[in-house]
Image (cartoon, rainbow, N blue to C red):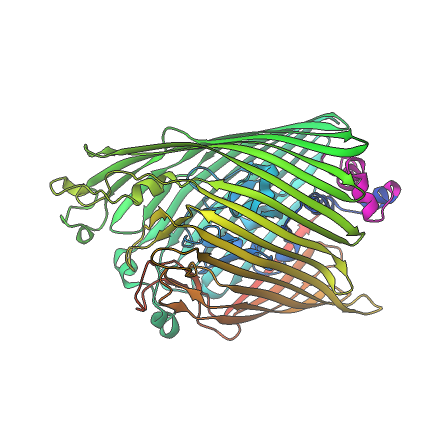
Amino acid sequence: MPSPKSLPAALLGLALTCPAMAETQGLELGQVLIQAENLSGQDQTIEDAKARLAEVPGGTNVIDMRRRLQGRVASNQDVLAYQPGVYAQSAGNEGVKISIRGSGINRAPGAHASGLYTMLDGLPLTGPGGTPYELLEPLWLDHVEVLRGANGFDRGALALGGAIDYVSHTGYDAPLLQVRYAMGSHGYQQRQISSGQVLGAFDYYLSSTDASADGYQDQTDSDSQGLIANVGYRFNPNLETRFYFRYRQTDNELAGRVTKHSLEHTPRAANPAYVARDDSRKQPGSTFIGNKTTYYIDDDSSIQTGLVYHDYPMDLREGPNRLKVAYTDISGTFDYKRRDTLWGRESRSTMGLRVTKHLPNAGASERVRIPTGNTGGYAPGTHMRNFTYQGSDTVLHVGNDLEIGDDLWLTTGLAAIYTRRESAVTYPDGGGKTSLGDWDYAPRLGLRYQLTPDVQVFGNLSRSVEAAHPWSLIYSANQRFPAGSGAATGTQRDPVNLQNQTATTLEIGGRGDSTLGQWSLAWYFSQVRHELLSVLPDANAVTPYELNASPTVHQGVEASLQSDLWSSAEGGRLSLRQSYTFSDFHYRNDDRFGDNRLPGLPMHYYQGELRYDWTQGFFAALNTQLVSKVEVDYANSYEADPYALFGATVGYNAPKGDWQTWLDLRNLTNKHYAATVTPGYDDKGVDAARSTPGEGLGVYLGVSWSLR
C-alpha cells in the first residue's frame, strides 16, 4: 500500500484492490473514502492490517498498541496478552517464553526463541540461530501482526508456530514529541522520548528508551537502553523507500529455576547454584540496519525488496564457564504481487524469496569463569573451546487467492526451503564437525467464505518445516573430549546430526461480529515428525540437550470474544474482552512415554478483562488470568500447580489525546505460582528445579504527554 497520510490510502487502497471485501462490509467506494479521511495515520495503519489479515484463511491477530500502553508494558508478555493461540509468560524480565501451537515448547524464558518466524517491520529478525529478544522494545511499536501456524505462508514463514511482525511507528502516525515515564514495584522504572513527523516527501520516527528493575526474585536485576530511527521517502506515487535502524543493549541477572517447594514457601529466593556463580546474561549491543523499497508497477502489481544487516553479540555467564558469542546475519527479501482476472473472477498472486545467512564470524569462545565448576580447577580465563555456528535459510514461495464463487476464495501455495546448518569445534585439536543441508517443501491449500457480511468461515491444510539451531548440534553432542584435553576435558566434542522438524496441519474456524460481540474461533490438528524437543540433564544445568522425538500430535482450540455489554446515552461503555487457548500436545505411541503429554505448557489458558470507559476519558478495569496445571517432565511424573491471577487498572486519557496516566495493579492476591516451566526428562516424581516464579503483588504508575 502507499504510505498513509499521503492520501487516505489504507482504506482507499483496500477498496481499489479488494472491491469484493469492501462490498462484504457494506461499503461503497465513496463511503470508504469518507471513513478514511476521518482516520488518523495510526488508525489507517491498524485498519489496513486488520483488513489484510481478514483475507487469510486461518487464525490471525492484530494488536493495537494504544490499548496496551494504557498500563505497564515492560516486555512481550504485556504486548501479547489477551491473544487467542498465543502463550507469552515471563518471570518479570525481558526473557519471555512465547509459544504458538506448541512452538518452542522446550525453551526456557530468555533462550533464543524457536518455532516462530519473527519480523521487524516486515524484515527478518529470526535467523538460523533463532530469535534474540533484546531488540523487541514494546514502546517503539504501532501494532503487532500475528499469523498463527501455517498462516504466515505469504511472509515466508514455514515454522510450526507461524509469524509475528512487530511494526514500528513512522512519521505518519507518531506525535511530533512524546515523553513517557513509568515506575513501580521491585524498583521498576521505564523512560521514553520520541519524535516523528512528515516533511514533504520525507517522514521520520526517532525514539530513545531505557528501563531498569531490581526484580521480584533475588538476583533478577535488569537494565536496558535502546534507540530506534526510521526514515521514509516517497520519490513519486509509484516508488517509496524506508531505512530502519535499531540499537539496543540488555543486562539481566539470572536467578535460575526453582522447585515447587521453594516457589510456594520462598518465591523470591533464587536457585542457590545460580547465586553462587552470580549468573547473568549480557547482550552488549545489538544492531539492526535495514531497508525496504516498494515499487508500484501499476494499479495491479508491485515489487518490494528488503535488505537487513543484524549483529547481535552475547556475553553469557550462565554457568561455570563464560561464553562469548558472535552472531551476524545478513537477510534479503523479494516480494512480487499482482492482481488479475481469471475466468471472469479476481485472482491475486504472490511470489516471494527470503534468504537469511550467518556471516563467517558466527561462533563462540568458551573460557573458565568459576574454577570450582571445572574438574581440573583451572584458573578463570583459561581457554576451553572455540566452535562455529553457521547456517542459512532460503525460502521460495508462490501463492494465489482465486475467487471461485461469490464471496468464496480458494488459496493455494507451494514453498521450497533449503536449510543449512553447520557446527565445528576449532579449538582444541581433535574436535569434530557436522554439516547438514536439506531441501524440503511446504504446500498450502485453503478456503474462506464470507457467509454473511458479518461472518467468515475458513479452513486450510498446510505443511511446516524447521531446522535445528546450529548451537543445538554442539550442545546435544554425546561425544566428549577425553581426559588429557586440558580445560576442554569432558566438554562436547563432535556435533550431532539433527533432522528437520516437519508437521502437517489441518485448521478450521471462523470470525465475525454478532450480538455477543466480535469473535474468532479456530481448531487445528498437527501431526509432527522429528519434533525438536530438549531436556535439561539436571536441575542446575544451563544448556539443554536437543534431539528429534518420535511422532507427536499438537492440537487445540483458539477463541476470542470482545463484547460491548452496556452503553449510556452520554457515551459511557462497559466492555469485556476474553481469550481462551486449549492445547493438547502429546506423543503418539512413544516406546517409553506412550501417549504422554508434552511438558512445558498448560492445557487451558484463559485471560479476561472487564472495563468501563467514561465519556470524560477516565477508565477502570478488572482482569484475570486462569492457567491449568503444567507437566514438568516427559514422564509426566510431576506437575506445576494451576493458578488464578487477578489485577486492576485505572487511568485517564485526555480527550485531546495529548496526555494520559494510569495505575496498574498486578497479582492482587499475591499468588505464588510458576510463570514458566522448562522441561526435564524423567524426574521420577521428585520435586526438581524446573519452574521460574511469577511476579508477586505489584503496583505500577505511568504518565505520558504528547505534542501533536
Q: Nearer the viewer, residue 47 or 206?
A: 47
Q: Could you tell me which residue is drawn at 63 percent across and 67 percent down?
A: 609
* x and y, in percent, of residue 203 in the image: 67, 35
Q: In the rendered structure, does residue 524 fall within the stretch colored magenta?
A: no
Left or right: 28 as drawn, with respect to 667: right
Q: In the rendered structure, does residue 23 fall within the stretch colored magenta?
A: yes
Against 8, residue 647 (above or below) is: below
Against 79, residue 503 (above or below) is: above
Quadrant of the rendering where the N terminus is positioned: top right
- Looking at this rendering, what residue extends furthest in the left direction? 484
Against 454, residue 464 (above or below) is: above
Q: Nearer the viewer, residue 702 or 566?
A: 566
* Residue 486 appears in the rendering: yes
Left or right: 217 as drawn, with respect to 343: left
Over which residues does the magenta segment extend?
1-30
Q: Nearer the viewer, residue 217 or 638?
A: 638
* x and y, in percent, of residue 279 in the image: 31, 54
- Please count the marks in the image: 0
Left or right: 411 as drawn, with respect to 214: right
